[in-house]
Amino acid sequence: MYKLLSAKPSPYARKVRIQLLEKGIPFELLTEVPWNSDTQTPRWNPLEKLPVLICPDGHSVFESRYVNEWIEMRHPEPPLMPRDVDGILAVKRFEVIVDGACDALILQLFENARGEDKRSQPWLDRQRRKVDGALRELSRMVDEREFCHGDAFTMADVATGTLLGYMAVRWPQLDWPTRYPNLAAYHRRMDARPSFAATRPETQVISDRVV
Ligand SMILES: N[C@@H](CCC(=O)N[C@@H](CS)C(=O)NCC(=O)O)C(=O)O
């Protein structure tokens, strides 16, 4: 059976959890705090980040978008990617925007953690702009459609639904549901899916000093 190194709040890990659940692939969830020194993450990923998919033969697969692709290639049914090239590229565009937004959010978390006297406001503003830009683009792309791409649930929905779920729980102070009611309605629909309901983000305590 597969094992998945995951963290409770991690949007990157959640994309993989949702994909595994949607495909009905059994896996053991190993919950870690990757920022703490006692984490086993570096044993499985030289980049020391999770999620990491650990195969039954001990092989490890890391970097969430690569893990998603790896799973899709090894377990193509039910498909979460369109079959046509234009469709695949369109779904990947959603994934790129979502991962960029998550990266910008997490950079802000750690910049804030440096403390009021040390944090850089220009750096925070820069990251905040990226998140705003991503949301504006996602709102335009999703429009009033039920799914991000075409008329079926794809990896674009896994990614977009995960970003919005992460922001809803970890960034409640950002007013995106008011600014983008279409994304708020889309998020409610995704959040009701069993794979999303079973993986809602939760907070974790980081005990080590990171910055
Ligand atoms: N680009 C990576 C980002 C993963 C990531 O940043 N994971 C965080 C947890 S949410 C982590 O493990 N960070 C530990 C570190 O960067 O040292 C991916 O998509 O897998």
Image (spheres, rainbow, N blue to C red):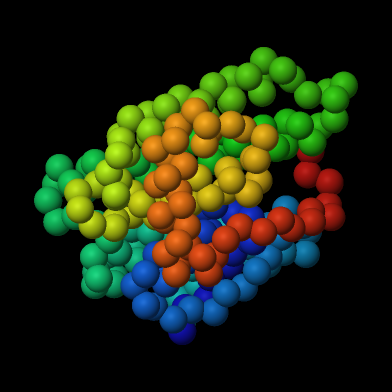
What residue sits 23% from the left and 65% below the top? 79
Q: Is residue 156 above or below residue 172?
A: below
Place residue 6 in its image quadrant: bottom right
The x, y position of residue 197, in whole percent, is: 51, 65
- Indicate the quadrant containing the C terminus: top left, top right, bottom left or bottom right: top right
What residue sits 46% from the left and 84% below the top? 1
Q: Is residue 2 left or right of residue 48?
A: left
The x, y position of residue 136, in whole percent, is: 42, 27
Q: Is residue 163 above or below residue 45?
A: above
What residue sits 54% from the left and 41% below the top? 102
What residue sits 52% from the left and 32% below the top? 178
Closer to us: 22 or 6: 22
Place residue 108 in its image quadrant: top right
The x, y position of residue 130, in whole percent, is: 51, 26
Q: Is residue 39 left or right of residue 101?
A: right
- Which residue is at the far left? 84
- Which residue is at the far top? 122
Closer to us: 14 or 70: 14
